[in-house]
């Protein structure tokens, strides 16, 4: 769930995620504090849970194939659903009892459902109808044919008949989210936050430890914490991007962000460690050796197709070619304090070069005569030192 009137995509809360295969239909009763949802793989089933995601109980599972849509009659505690494979509209009590078929229509797959003013309104996309059904008898009340387009779902819009309901959350000062449940209002927090001891405030958290080493493999990030006292290694939960192959990455620990090159899709991405939200920053060519200048908000990398050094501004979202026409490059590092770039130029012999984000003329720091076959670079910001692998 997320606030209805916020555009911030990080403001959301995962309510149910375990033991789900293909969730599809969803209906809410905010007065009684229930949610109902269908899961259609491998067999259809309907589950009832509190609006905070707890106390999930399967209430209907026999004789279901694909429940595509759900709705409720909150005044009578009735749940209604459409099974698009069985060609039925059915109903039961909130606890799954007194189940019966409202209407069966051969080869008619009903889709969206809404209960409104004692009529069950259903969508028949195959025949391009919206139909009204008497909920008790299943008798057709009205037909509305769409001459243009195919209806797929529907929602009630009524500005005149707005029910007057006392909001149970009005007496609870929740820091982020309040939902009503059968046992009363409950405070929840957005993903990346934990509920404080007062039961109302929310505290930021991270899946990772406060310090350690982040390791990538294929499409996964994982942190390991190594104790300097006893040498015990602990692993943290993993963060995955199932659509990616992680080639190179950097971390902004202050903002708890990971930037990485997805070599499968040739894009630059950002992963928020707290919310686990992933966004694509820009498309790139075949890149490697990603670096972060956190002081200036710049990401840099080597383009291995054109042998260029590319920069991307996190502030302006502009991409710029800093150096071009270079020999093959092996590795890159950055000094955020002075805005210096370091890279290994040439394969054999190799030279460690130094440049700037403004593209000013680079200079040679070390040649292959001074350091034998350097292969990797890393800049120590604390001690102002450049390290290389040989």
Image: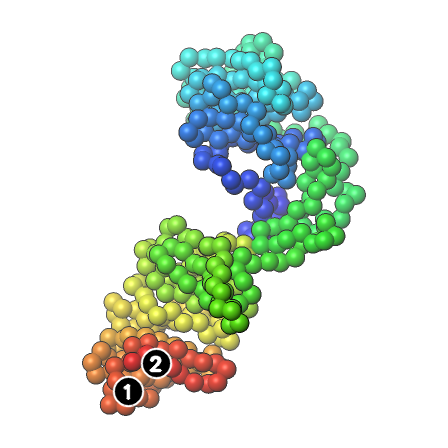
**Among all residues in the image, which is located at the extreme bottom?**
370
Q: Residue at x 64, y 53 (%)?
A: 194
- Residue 96 in the image: state x and y as whole percent: 59, 21
Disc 2, SS:
strand
Kindly check if marks 1 and 2 are in contact, taking CB atoms under 8 A apart as contact.
yes
For the C terminus, give its image quadrant. bottom left
16 in relation to 159, above or below? below
For the N terminus, give its image quadrant. top right
Q: Which mark is residue 235?
A: none
- Residue 181 in the image: state x and y as whole percent: 69, 36
Q: Residue at x 49, y 61 (%)?
A: 234
Circle 2: is it few (<14), some (14-19), or many (20+) Cα within 10 Å?
Answer: some
Q: How is the image coloured?
A: rainbow
**Among all residues in the image, which is located at the extreme front?**
230
Q: Residue 347 falls in which quadrant of the image?
A: bottom left
Q: Which residue is disc 2 drawn over?
A: 388
Question: With 144 as the anchor, is 263 left or right in this view?
Answer: left
160 in relation to 11, above or below? above
Disc 1, SS:
loop
Q: Residue at x 45, y 17 (%)?
A: 87
Circle 1: is it few (<14), some (14-19), or many (20+) Cα within 10 Å?
Answer: some
Q: Which mark is residue 371?
A: 1
CA distance separating discs 1 and 2: 9 Å
Question: With 112 as the anchor, is 332 left or right in this view?
Answer: left
Q: Residue at x 55, y 40 (%)?
A: 16
Which mark is first along the chain, 2 or 1?
1
Q: Nearer the viewer, residue 60 or 315?
A: 60
């Amino acid at each position: 769930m997320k606030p209805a009137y916020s555009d911030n995509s990080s403001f959301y809360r995962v309510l149910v995620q375990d033991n789900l295969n293909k969730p599809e239909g969803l209906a809410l009763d905010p007065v009684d504090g229930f949610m109902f949802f269908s899961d259609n793989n491998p067999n259809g089933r309907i589950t009832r849970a509190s609006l905070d995601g707890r106390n999930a109980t399967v209430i209907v599972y026999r004789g279901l194939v694909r429940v595509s849509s759900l709705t409720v009659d909150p005044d009578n505690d009735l749940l209604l659903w459409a099974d698009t494979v069985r060609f039925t509209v059915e109903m039961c009590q909130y606890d799954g009892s007194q189940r019966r078929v409202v209407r069966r229509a051969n080869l008619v797959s009903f889709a969206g459902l809404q209960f409104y003013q004692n009529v069950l309104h259903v969508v028949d996309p195959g025949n391009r109808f919206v139909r009204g059904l008497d909920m008790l008898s299943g008798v057709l009340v009205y037909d509305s044919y769409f001459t243009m387009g195919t209806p797929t779902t529907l929602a009630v819009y009524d500005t005149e008949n707005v029910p007057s309901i006392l909001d149970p959350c009005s007496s609870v000062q929740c820091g982020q989210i309040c939902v009503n449940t059968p046992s009363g209002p409950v405070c929840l927090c957005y993903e990346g936050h934990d509920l404080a001891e007062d039961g109302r405030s929310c505290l930021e958290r991270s899946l990772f430890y406060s310090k350690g080493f982040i390791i990538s493999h294929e499409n996964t990030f994982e942190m390991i914490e190594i104790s300097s006292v006893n040498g015990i290694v602990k692993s943290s939960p993993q963060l995955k991007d199932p659509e990616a192959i992680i080639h190179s990455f950097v971390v902004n620990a202050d903002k708890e962000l990971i930037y990485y090159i997805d070599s499968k899709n040739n894009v630059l991405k950002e992963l928020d460690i707290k919310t686990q939200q992933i966004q694509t920053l820009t498309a790139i060519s075949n890149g490697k050796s990603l670096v972060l200048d956190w002081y200036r908000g710049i990401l840099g990398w080597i383009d291995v197709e054109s042998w260029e050094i590319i920069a991307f501004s996190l502030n302006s979202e502009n991409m710029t070619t800093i150096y071009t026409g270079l020999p093959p490059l092996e590795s890159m590092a950055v000094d955020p304090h002075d805005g210096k770039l370091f890279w290994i130029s040439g394969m054999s012999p190799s030279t460690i070069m130094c440049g700037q984000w403004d593209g000013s003329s680079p200079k040679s720091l070390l040649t292959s005569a001074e350091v034998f076959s350097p292969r990797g670079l890393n800049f120590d910001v604390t001690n102002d030192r450049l390290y290389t692998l040989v």
